[in-house]
Amino acid sequence: MTLFIIFHGFIGAPQVILILAAILLLFGGRKIPELMKGLGSGIKEFKKATKEDEKGSETVEEEKENPKIENKKDQ
């Protein structure tokens, strides 16, 4: 829905400038780099977790296709 709004021209350059000005007024010039750094690290962690989850699901699928036969010895 958001992409629909952006691509069909409901949000133009004046609106983006207004939003950025409001953010600058709310947080100030010194806080914005800190906010962006936190946002970037959050996105990085999300991507890392997604990749780990994909690797985990691939190994589970491989184990289902090729189950290992374990020999248990009674002692």
Image (spheres, rainbow, N blue to C red):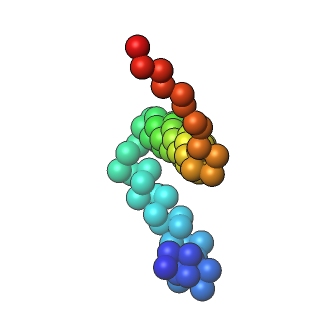
**Split into 4 quadrants, where in the image is the C terminus?**
top left
- Which residue is the extreme one toward the front? 74
> Against 32, is 23 above or below?
below
**How far across and down, in percent of the image, does residue 69 sit?**
58, 36
> Against 11, is 38 above or below?
above
Identify the residue shown where x is 39% and y is 51%.
25
- Which residue is the extreme one toward the top? 75
45 horizontally vs 55: left or right: left
Q: Nearer the viewer, residue 12 or 25?
A: 12
Q: How many marks?
A: 0
Question: Is residue 69 visible in this depiction of the protein?
Answer: yes
Identify the residue shown where x is 59% and y is 37%.
68
Question: Is residue 36 visible in this depiction of the protein?
Answer: no
Identify the residue shown where x is 44% and y is 50%.
24
**How far across and down, in percent of the image, does residue 18 sit?**
47, 66
Q: Nearer the viewer, residue 70 or 63?
A: 70
Identify the residue shown where x is 57% and y is 50%.
64
**How far across and down, in percent of the image, does residue 39 sit?**
48, 43
**How far across and down, in percent of the image, does residue 65 sit?**
63, 51
